[in-house]
Image (cartoon, rainbow, N blue to C red):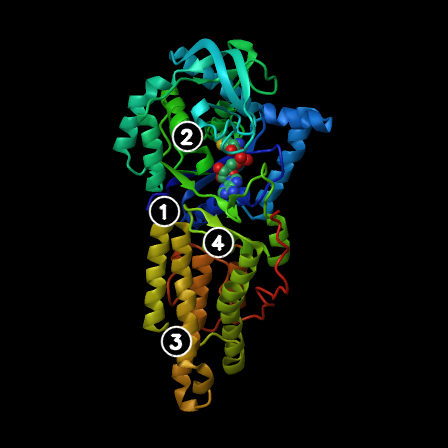
Amino acid sequence: MPVQPTFLTTPIYYVNAQPHLGHAYTTIAADVYARHMRQRGEDVFFLTGTDEHGDKNARVAAELGLTPQAFVDRNSANFLRMTEDVRATQDFFIRTTDEGHMRFVQDFLQTLKDNGHVYEGTYEGLYCTGCEAFYKEEELVDGLCPDHGTKPEWLQESNWFFRLSAFQQPLLDHYDAHPDFVSPQSRFNEARSFISGGLDDVSLSRASIEWGVPLPWAPDQTCYVWFDALLNYASAMTYARPGEDLTARYWPPRWQLLAKDILKFHAVIWPAMLMGAGYALPQRLMIHGYLTVRDTKMSKSIGNVLDPFAVIEAYGVDALRFYLLRDVRFGGDGGISYEAVHERYHSELANDLGNLVNRVIAMIGKYRDGVIPDARCETGIANAVELAREAIGRHVADMELTEALEAAWSVVRDLNRFVDARAPWVLAKDPALAAELDEVLYTLADGTRACAILLAAVLPDSAPRILAALGAGDDVAWEQAAPNLLAAGAQTAATGPLFPRVEEPLGSAAP
Ligand code: ME8
């Protein structure tokens, strides 16, 4: 099979505040996809980073008495640390203050202008600094920003505009020709009906904001922060690897991940910008839902955030990754809480998986001196592994990450049922049943090994520990997610508790 290039992206996060679980969520989801595709031998480029221009940062920096650059340096480092803490394996961490990015933005804007898609006009309207977005009167709720509950400011200035209106028909044509352009279907419909309702031109520059990329033909204006930010996905290709342009290898993105708050920017303006400059459009956009705390979107500006670092500290990074994909169906909205983290951790990771591993190692130690017996995997478990592998491959390709995790977990549950049904402790009492005991122990060890491979993208810390405990080496290649690949004669090794008990849930961070 030829190696597939797979370019995938998360949004680049605003650095005006600290990273929270919402950011960790998208980054973890993308990382699970990236790790899975690498397991399959694909050529993956996974991009994430920070969005650093715009008035919002300049204002917060000023309040703190810092230069904008010093402020964004400090906060971007926190986001980079978040990606490390959640074990994200991005191939590049982009910052929109990178020189390579800024150069690309200027070139791209010039191309749009040369292609006749940019004109000068006057902008008059309402602007929410929280969203860095313009609003129409009818979009406000009681005169306030629907997302931030703050009063937008009235702006009037001379701007340069992008002729978005001209792309209405090309966008509709693209949507109609690519019914899987936006997932889930409800978001596709939402974006398409927004486009069919008519598109206004959008301002692509700001006169009054200095902290941004100057327009090449009018350096007294800076690029509107959303144009600047969206272009990160393309700019990264040009400078992530010094001296190499990756565009031909990876463009267009296979998947772009984001939440529904920024749907219009990604599903309407972004493809129009790309069309205007002659770029191929991303293949698919995955619009996931909101993590909510007590029914309210978790957000920095609202202040009801769960702390991903506290969860990692208390339960380990695998628990966080597992919880986020397991408890909230990826794509929909879902309530999260420290209590639910605590509950999932103990009932599933510690009990279902951790105990399974410990029991298997203990029984092989007790009955076979820690040596994997020479036997074949029982057919029911072998089939379960094969089915799960096929289902996970299909689900991950379609970004159905919760369904993929459930498919892996069904094998964990099958193994637990198998151990109870076949009761090795009973078989061990009768030497005449030694061959049957061998089969049962081999099935448990081999099935648990296969589960570790199936779960490796979600549990990057524990999966290698499980493999090591079973004497199964460290290869997590997808071909290994098949039955009967554990070598007879391999030696098991003691492992400490994979998911040690945590006494109390973390205190609720909600107000
Ligand atoms: O919008 N639930 O940055 P941002 C789920 N810089 N996901 C959440 C979330 C929540 N409660 N809160 C945040 C921006 N996210 C722009 C993006 S891209 C060219 C520019 C995640 O810091 C989710 O991915 O506000 C959401 O789309 C993103 O963080 C918004 O991050």
Where disc 1 sits, the SS reads helix
Dot 2 or dot 1: first in sequence order is: 2
Dot 1 or dot 3: first in sequence order is: 3
Query: CB atoms at circles 2 and 3 under 8 Å apart?
Result: no
Instruction: Please give left or right for residue 87 compared with residue 62 in the image.
Output: left
Query: CB atoms at circles 1 and 3 under 8 Å apart?
Result: no
Q: Residue at x 59, y 17 (%)?
A: 209
Q: Dot 2: few (<14), some (14–19), or many (≥20) neighbours within 10 Å?
A: some
Query: CB atoms at circles 4 and 2 under 8 Å apart?
Result: no
Q: Which residue is mark 3?
A: 375
Mark 1 CB near ligand 1 (8 Å cut): no
Mark 4 CB near ligand 1 (8 Å cut): no
Q: Which residue is mark 2?
A: 264
The three-letter code of the residue at mark 1 reads Ala
Q: Which residue is mark 1?
A: 397
Please say if 406 is above or below 116: below
The three-letter code of the residue at mark 2 reads Lys
Closest to the camera, between mark 4 and mark 2, is 2
Dot 3 or dot 4: first in sequence order is: 3
Q: Dot 4: few (<14), some (14–19), or many (≥20) neighbours within 10 Å?
A: many
Closest to the camera, between mark 1 and mark 3, is 1
Residue 458's mark?
Answer: 4
User: Marks 2 and 3, how far apart in space?
Assistant: 56 Å
Closest to the camera, between mark 2 and mark 3, is 2
- Whether residue 254 is visible to the viewer of this picture, yes or no, is yes
User: Marks 4 and 2, how far apart in space?
Assistant: 30 Å
The three-letter code of the residue at mark 3 reads Ala
User: Marks 4 and 1, how far apart in space?
Assistant: 15 Å
Q: Residue at x 40, y 45 (%)?
A: 42
Q: Quadrant of residue 20?
A: top right
Dot 4 or dot 2: first in sequence order is: 2
